[in-house]
């Protein structure tokens, strides 16, 4: 959503490519480091540090990176579960208007929240154990004043069928269900207000492998049926490859690469992406790509290194990498990377 003028508040408008449902510009989320009896702020943990990306309508954007890199924090900033420190979250409403979610007041946010929902990682802790399935799925419908009475119950029954659950279980509580069934309840809850964008925060990582496949297939079917757009957060590149149209790679709060899934796996441009791909399990015994073991530890987001955050662990690092922060740039058509040497390096991907 570039080359445009954005007005502040709920009435914000933008003239741009209609395919872009969401665009993030310069998003930051810093958590204060407090010390002493008076809780004096002595530093900042840069959980999300100047992120720029976009999601097209109807696609699945995979978000991958090591644990603690800021993936979940980014997702929660998008749905306004937590407040961003700085930056813009531009979202296109069904009527064509574009609002900056980061700047909406409570009233404006409430009226637009139904268009963006989240599926949480843990299907056990994300459901209220004191509420029945009927109450859990009906909650966002009531909150957004979409339906009531018999119409509400019928809507919940319809959603139960859509996600593969039996209507006779409406009055049951979460403890009576397996992990996969609980995640289906969470998916039904997210579908309840007819959203346009769903943030899937490690939606299958807590499930058995066979159940993971079922949930992934369900999400893809629902995407086709309801014209959904996904931001799919995961740390498993095999899952990302299966479900994503494009992939964004994060490292210590920064986005380091973004491109189409096939392009990323075959032709990575960032050394960190190359290292991640080398860890993907190979099904072909003839594929002998050597595992890249990164030296050192992941950088501390509360005290990141100068220059490129990845340079202390990068075998390709030069002096410029240690002193100058790399710019986010497009090195090929729709292939963005943050690396000084992206044009000259030939990195190994996965066939």
Image (cartoon, rainbow, N blue to C red):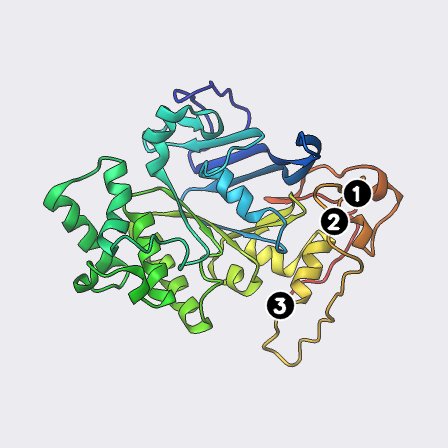
Label 2 belongs to which residue? 299
Label 3 belongs to which residue? 280
Callout 3 touching callout 2 (CB < 8 Å): no
In front of the other: label 3 or label 2?
2
Label 1 belongs to which residue? 305
Q: Residues within 10 Å of mark 1 (few under 14, many from 20)?
A: some
Q: Earlier in the sequence, mark 2 or mark 1?
A: 2
Residue situated in front as seen by the camera: 147 or 261 = 147
Query: For numbered disc 2, what is the local secondary structure?
Result: loop
Q: Quadrant of residue 36?
A: top right
In front of the other: label 1 or label 3?
1
- Identity of the residue drawn at 52% across and 23% down: 4
Callout 2 touching callout 1 (CB < 8 Å): yes
Q: Note whether 3 is above or below 63 in the view shown.
A: above
Q: Earlier in the sequence, mark 1 or mark 3?
A: 3
Callout 1 touching callout 3 (CB < 8 Å): no
- In the image, taking residue 298 as reference, residue 71 lies left or right, namely left
Measured from the top left, where is residue 162 in percent x and y? 25, 58
Measured from the top left, where is residue 19 in percent x and y? 43, 38
Mark pair 2, 1: CA separation? 7 Å
Q: Is residue 97 in view from this perspective? A: no
Q: Note whether 216 is above or below 14 in the view shown.
A: below
């Amino acid at each position: 959503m570039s080359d445009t003028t954005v007005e502040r508040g709920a009435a914000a408008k933008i003239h741009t490519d209609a395919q872009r449902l969401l665009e993030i510009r310069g998003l930051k989320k810093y958590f204060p480091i407090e010390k002493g009896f008076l809780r004096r702020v002595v530093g900042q943990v840069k959980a999300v540090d100047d992120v720029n990306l976009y999601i097209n309508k109807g696609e699945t954007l995979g978000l991958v990176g090591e644990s603690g890199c800021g993936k979940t924090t980014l997702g929660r900033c998008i749905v306004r579960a937590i407040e961003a420190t700085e930056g813009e979250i531009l979202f296109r409403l069904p009527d064509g208007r574009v609002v900056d979610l980061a700047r909406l007041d409570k009233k404006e946010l409430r009226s637009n929240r139904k268009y963006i929902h989240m599926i949480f990682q843990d299907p056990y802790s994300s459901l209220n154990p004191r509420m029945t399935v009927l109450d859990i799925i009906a909650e966002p419908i009531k909150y957004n004043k979409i339906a009531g009475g018999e119409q509400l119950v019928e809507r919940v029954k319809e959603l139960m069928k859509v996600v593969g659950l039996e209507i006779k279980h409406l009055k049951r509580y979460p403890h009576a269900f397996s992990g996969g069934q609980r995640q289906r309840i969470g998916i039904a809850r997210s579908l309840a207000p007819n959203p346009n964008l769903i943030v899937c925060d490690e939606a299958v990582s807590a499930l058995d492998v066979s159940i993971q496949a079922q949930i992934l297939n369900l999400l893809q079917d629902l995407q086709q049926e309801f014209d959904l757009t996904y931001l799919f957060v995961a740390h498993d590149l095999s899952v990302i490859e299966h479900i994503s149209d494009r992939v964004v790679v994060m490292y210590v709060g920064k986005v380091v690469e973004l491109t189409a899934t096939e392009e990323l796996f075959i032709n990575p441009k960032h050394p960190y992406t190359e290292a991640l791909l080398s860890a993907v399990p190979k099904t072909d015994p003839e594929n002998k790509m050597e595992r890249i073991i990164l030296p050192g530890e992941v950088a501390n987001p509360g005290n990141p290194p100068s220059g490129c955050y990845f340079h202390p662990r990068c075998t390709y690092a030069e002096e410029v990498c240690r002193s100058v922060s790399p710019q986010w740039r497009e090195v090929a058509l729709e292939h963005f990377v943050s690396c000084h040497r992206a044009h000259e390096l030939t990195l190994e991907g996965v066939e």
